[in-house]
Image (cartoon, rainbow, N blue to C red):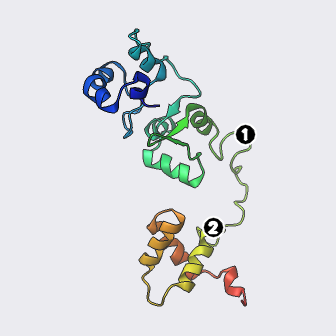
Amino acid sequence: MTIRRRARVSLATWRRKHAAAFREHVPDLLPESRYLLYDLAQTDAYLKGRPIPQLPDGEHPDDLLTADDVAQILGINTSTVRAYATQGHLSPGTTRYGARLWTRREVHDRLHNAPGQGKGGGRRAGEPQGPRKTHAYEGDPRIDLAAHALTTAAPGTPKSRIAAQLADLHGHTPRTWERLLTTAAAVPHASDDDPN
């Protein structure tokens, strides 16, 4: 709910008479978001003319963390946090008011239970690695999409145009789709053996 509704005034009145004073007393919880987000208890206290309570000190497992916060805890770049969320190494998080957020509990779980770490994680010394992939995208369902796009594209269509169309349809970057198209062109597919 918007603050001006809680204050029971029009948007114009809120902006003209109340917004500046409110922002002086109540801190924005997500300063990097394009939206302004405030603590409900602090907002209600301000609107009722009461002393504004301090936000709780310390950490809580349900605290919502930004990508910058997650990066700092995991010791990685913010762009890596977003990549982890896209690739499934971290949940996609939740989007609130234009900012993607993760719970502190989830981030600490990822920190202390990273893939390949902990009891039984990873390969033991001297143990064979197992079969290697024939290419980086082996088993990736996007290879079939890329192969189909190559076979159905008009002759002479630039790979970059096909990649941009695939990115629009299925997500990921055009550069990723260019790599997938290159791999699809170089390796045989199940669809190549299909007589239909």
Q: What residue type is labelled 2?
A: Asp
Residue at left 58%, top 33%? 108
At mark 2, the secondary structure is: loop
Residue 18, horizontal then vertical, whole percent:
30, 23
Q: Distance from label 1 to label 2 (Cα)?
A: 29 Å
From the viewer's side, name the closer residue of 46 and 171.
Answer: 46
Q: Name the residue under label 2.
A: 140
Q: Which amino acid does label 1 sit on?
A: Lys
Residue at left 59%, top 74%? 145
Quadrant containing the C terminus in the rendered view: bottom right
Residue at left 39%, top 15%? 46
From the viewer's side, name the closer residue of 104 and 132.
Answer: 104
Question: Horizontal placement of 117 versus 103: left or right?
Answer: right
Q: Residues within 10 Å of mark 2 (few under 14, many from 20)?
A: few
Question: Horizontal placement of 37 versus 107: left or right?
Answer: left
Q: Residues within 10 Å of mark 1 (few under 14, many from 20)?
A: few
Say if 127 sits above or below 33 in the image.
below
Mark 1 or 2: in front is 2
Q: Name the residue under label 1.
A: 119
Quadrant in which residue 30 is drawn: top left
- Are dots 1 and 2 in contact, CB under 8 Å? no
Please tell me which of labels 1 and 2 falls first in the chain: 1
Residue 24, horizontal then vertical, whole percent:
29, 21
Residue at left 40%, top 22%? 7
Residue 1, horizontal then vertical, whole percent:
47, 31
From the viewer's side, name the closer residue of 3 and 170.
Answer: 3
Question: Horizontal placement of 5 versus 184: left or right?
Answer: left
Residue 62, horizontal then vertical, whole percent:
58, 28
